Image (cartoon, helix red, strand yellow):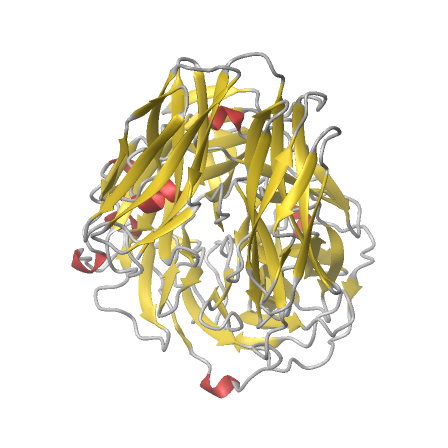
Amino acid sequence: MLAAGGASAQTAQSNLTVTYPAGFAVSPPLSQISQPAFLPTVQTIIPLRPRPLAGGGALAPSLPDQALQTAAGWPLELEDEGGAPRFFGVGANGYAPPDPNLAVGPNHIVQIVNVEFAVYSKSGAIFAGYPKTIGSLFSALGGSCTGEWGDAIVQYDRAADRWLISQLGSFSAPFAECFAVSRTNDPTGTYNLYAYSFGNNLNDYPKIGVWPTSTNSAYTATYNLFLNGGPFVGSALCAYDRAAMLGGAASPASICYTITNDAGYLPSDLDGSTLPPSGSSGVFLTFETLSSLRYYRLSPNFANPGSSTLSAPTDIAVASFSEACGGGTCIPQSGTSQLLDSLGDRPMYRLAYRNFGDHDALVFNHSVAAGSSVGLRWYELRSPLAGAFTLYQQGTFAPDSTYRWMGSAAMDQAGDIAVGYSASSSSLFPAIRYTGRTPADALGTMRTETSLLGGAGSQTGGLSRWGDYTALRIDPSDDCTFWYTNQYQPSNGSFNWATFIGTFKFTNCGGAPTPDFSVSASPASQTVVQGNQASYTVTVAASGGFAGSVSLTAAGIPSGATATFSPTSITSGSGSSTMNVTTTASTVAGSYTLTITGTSGSLTHSTTVTLVVNSAGSANFSISASPSSRTVTRGNSTTYTVTVASINGFNGPVALRVRGLPLNSSASFNPSSVTGQGTSTMTVSTNTSTSTGTFSLRIRGTSGSATHSTTVQLVVQ
């Protein structure tokens, strides 16, 4: 249901909507859901709704591509491909297109197509009872989510060791998005099930990202909105309360902004074990014109959704291009006049994000015209941690006249970039291929492509749809192995598509890690009255065997205030320091971004926090809690000390409560309220069925209309 609209977004072309699930349930273990052979009596084509063209289209001028790569490049240097797992995936089920994508965990592969999914071992053995229809997963939830609507996505949330599966909820109003979040790390186990309504707007072409920051973690999503499935009315950029969904809460909030002018956005999606910087905003990106990209950053506040913010748009100039096939259909195949859709009107899933410790990186691709054929335009964007993204490199891979499209890009821990894609021509059946590059290669270039699987037929019968997206993933076990899935034709036909899953790995990935460190700080924001002090905990974490000394400094301190660190440096590679910011009566009231920098020789890393200074005079209170994190084994309890401080003589009662607890746990306060100032002990109790993982607990104090909160972390093992 819609809770509120608002104008909290910082752009005139957007508006805020806060939504809570229209339904919630818990599935039985998927291994216990029986699934008969699935084949509809009527073959079904899931409709494609084009995004508004970005100045392109069939009548768009042919633009010279300054990023075009026409040479084949050096051969890829890969580990022995003879032992790499490669196997056939889910096959035709009466629906088209297949929309193949997958997720990779430590021990499992989950592949999903338009209306079915399957679980495999990493050697390619399919688990008994699979594939199953996606609707069967949602049987306990009931309603439209039990149907087969397509546009499905599967994710492995590495930071939580959990799985997420989503699909559209309907082709008619009320439209919806359906989410299933696993309650354990077993993809064949039970799931928390949610249905979020989009009312009269069809939420078409959903793309899902994982954005697990320590303070505003979210599952992010983008949708193209069509009123009653008809006219385009905008793009929805959304964030779902990840901590609450992992914890099995019945009503996790979703925060969505509608962008009226653009479509085809992708949400940033984490690869690797290093989380985005604490408090950093999720990125939502599309190509805005035929020579520019555009992105927004969304900062959700699930405790106070109305204070969420969407940044103003940032545009990045890129080499000019023309949309593949004018955004439409022109891909040839061998032995038939049937042409295939290019989906050149939109970026291709995923917008893969990686935190390298000293910078952020984003990679993605889309299909563009390349002379008389079609090629892959790919990008790497970089930023200082949580800073503005700029173009680092770009290229259009079109080494010959073969048509290449339907790509998916990703980056491994060594900075190698790979793109998997479909390839076809008038003399070639649609095939599955990939290419890649290492950081040592010339910017903007890819190496020679490699065939993952050759096609054995063409798609005929008047069907032009050839998938809507594919997925290239990184194996969390080594952060080096790429897994790719795409479709092919085993023989000429229209509804007889098949899918394939394969892996490859660059030889340079997985060597000795470079010693380094990261800097984080909590809480993300503190509020003080002029003349008072605020404290932050600054944490330095070592990686790659780093053991040096890190000195700490702060910038952005307002006039009339000072900042001190205790201790002033961190020795032996990792540790924490307390940063005290002391204001005076002359410190101007306002909100300030403080940049905390750690330096060790030539290594420098930073993080930011917010300081809000209020004018002295009115009575108020502040709330804090310690320690910032506790770890508890299921079946035990742990405690935090909650402190309420009086400001300007405040002496009212402050009632305490907490949100974000994991499923099957409870919390109590002793005392349950504090008058004026004082402390309370918050006890969190778990049992043997409590969900495991890392949870962000928001402790809120309320006195009349005044509300303040603080956040602590709970790790359940």
Question: Looking at the image, which is closer to me, 261 or 79?
Answer: 79
Image coords of residue 278 (percent x, y): 55, 47
The residue lying at 60 percent from left, 27 percent from top is: 532
- In the rendered structure, the answer to whether residue 710 lies left or right of residue 315 reads left
- In the rendered structure, the answer to whether residue 651 lies left or right of residue 384 reads left
Question: Looking at the image, which is closer to me, 281 or 238?
Answer: 281
Image coords of residue 305 (percent x, y): 47, 28
Is residue 290 visible in the rendered image? The answer is no
Q: Relative to 637, does residue 22 appear above or below in the rendering?
A: above
The residue lying at 47 percent from left, 44 percent from top is: 217
Question: Looking at the image, which is closer to me, 71 or 539?
Answer: 539
The N terminus lies in which quarter of the figure? top left
Quadrant of the image occupied by residue 585: top right
Q: Relative to 355, does residue 622 appear above or below in the rendering?
A: above
The residue lying at 42 percent from left, 37 percent from top is: 625
The C terminus lies in which quarter of the figure? bottom left
Is residue 486 visible in the rendered image? The answer is yes
Q: Relative to 141, does residue 136 appear above or below in the rendering?
A: below
- In the rendered structure, the answer to whether residue 581 lies left or right of residue 669 reads right
Quadrant of the image occupied by residue 569: bottom right
Q: Relative to 473, does residue 170 appear above or below in the rendering?
A: above
Image coords of residue 659 (percent x, y): 35, 34
